[in-house]
Amino acid sequence: MKNLLKATALTAALVCAASAAQAQAPKQPLRIGMTFQELNNPYFVTMKQALEEAAASIGATVVTTDARHDVAKQIGDVEDMIQKKVDILLLNPTDSTGVQSAVRSAKKAGLVVVAVDANAQGPVDSFVGSKNTDAGRLACEYLAKSIGEKGDVAILDGIPVVPILERVKGCREALAKYPGIKVVSTQNGKQERATALTVTENILQANKDLKGIFSVNDGGSMGALAAIDASGKDVKLASVDGAPEAIKAMQKPGSKFIATTAQYPRDQIRLAIGIALAKKWGANVPAAVPVDVKLIDAEGAKTFTW
């Protein structure tokens, strides 16, 4: 958490340093636009709530959109925000490469652009996001130790965006340290409960000696958990996010859901707004602000919350 505190302090310092310049500017309501890759995920819903709370505290207005994992829609949403003359664009890309044209258009229109959770290609002013490689590594190190450092393991993959790719990379790096562990299956659960449930059922049927599963997010992990429980097998499950439903499931006696690497969606939004304000008011800002993650097990789940 030291790095998170440093990032928070850095953002506060940038805002303070730039506030003198802002004080000389005409008083106008600040307009913040944010386009999300999806809003049917508690993680992004929490981000949206934090955005609205933070904006209200500084008297800013907010425009939010849901791309529903459609890059063409997200590009259109950004163009609409440009027409609405937002001052700051917070971009949670559904396709890091595909949104390049939208980033360029926003910058050409004079907007401050900060990518959140997943970075975007193009001239973004800064990126604020979790250390996703660490997230995958922490979860899979815990999983490996929980199964006695040996046995068959499966990876429940997701949509190929950078954060998900990094989590899988971190997981594989962790598991590679244990010669007795073999990754026998990697399947795409699309980070959705229903899809992950079906995919996990198939994985369990095809791999009779499976000992563990790593899910790239908690939404998918809930479907995986349902499949594991229905199978009656002793298969341990680890994930990433720290979502309320996952935290609750981990605390049930005998739960096969043993750990999740928690992200901090509220902190990401607060840091992103701070960075964007500092940039708008004339400060130099860092190209990236990595946010720490934390491994939460059943014991830690008792006191953890987003």
Image (tube, rainbow, N blue to C red):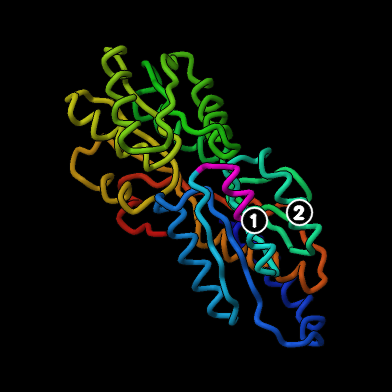
Residue at point 66%, 77% (across, down): 30
Q: Nearer the viewer, residue 44 or 258?
A: 44
Q: Residue at x 77, y 81 (%)?
A: 22
Q: Position of residue 239 (x, y in %)?
A: 41, 38
Q: Position of residue 260 (x, y in %)?
A: 40, 42
* Residue 69 position (above or below residue 6): above
The quadrant of the rendering that contains the N terminus is: bottom right
Say the numbered circle drawn on residue 115: none
Residue 289 drawn above or below residue 274: above
Q: Which residues are magenta?
A: 69-78
Classify the position of the C terminus by image quarter.
bottom left
Classify mark 2: helix, strand or loop: helix
- Above or below for 138 versus 181: below
Residue on which disc 2 sits:
105
Q: Which mark is residue 78?
A: 1
Amino acid type indicated by mark 2: Ser
Let me know if residue 59 is in the magenta part: no
Image spot of residue 111 (x, y percent) = 74, 63
Q: Earlier in the sequence, mark 2 or mark 1?
A: 1
Number of residues whose C-alpha sits closer than 10 Å to that of mark 2, classed few (under 14), some (14–19) or many (20 or more): some
Q: Main secondary structure of the magenta part?
A: helix
